[in-house]
Image: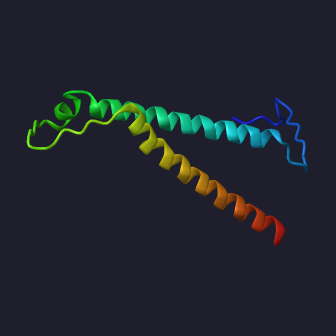
Amino acid sequence: MSLSKQVVPVITTISTTKTERSTRSNLAYAAFILLCFWVGMQILSLMAHAPGVLEHLAQGNDTTRPRIEMGFIVSTVFGVVPFLAGCALLGVVSLALKFHHRFHF
């Protein structure tokens, strides 16, 4: 079923200037995603290091392998720091490409 006229009129505005709000919202969204990844990594780390959970999931109890004890701070440093460094590297590359595209065209 189609109508001959629009029920709700569409008002379109064309903006030629970029606003600063979009950059702030993008940064807030990126920080939120990083927080979600960090929380997910901590939950997976807790599941893997809880006594018996990993053995129950793997359906095996091998006592010949050494038990590895890793604290919360160690897993945070070795989990979050490389992730944030990789994100920073991707951010620097994308900014370089953006400035290269802006000033050479």
Q: Residue 41, position in %: x, y? A: 42, 37
Is residue 96 rendered to the left or right of residue 8?
left
Q: Quadrant of residue 77?
A: top left
Along the line of sight, which residue is nearer the eye, 65 or 23? Answer: 65
Q: Count the numbered circles shown.
A: 0
Identify the residue at image location x=17%, y=34%: 55
85 vs 12: above or below:
below
Q: Position of residue 37 (x, y in %)?
A: 49, 38
Left or right of residue 21: residue 29: left
On screen, residue 90 above or below 3: below
Q: Position of residue 75 (x, y in %)?
A: 39, 38
Residue name at image x 60 percent, y 56 percent? 90
The image quadrant where one finds the N terminus is top right
- Which image quarter is the C terminus in? bottom right
Residue sitting at x 81%, y 72%: 104
Identify the residue at the far top of this view. Answer: 51
Q: Residue at x 8, y 43 (%)?
A: 64
Give x and y (percent) for residue 61.
10, 36
In the rendered image, which quarter is residue 45 located in? Answer: top left
Colouring chosen for the image of the structure = rainbow
Q: Nearer the viewer, residue 76 or 101?
A: 76
Within the image, what quadrant is residue 76 found in?
top left
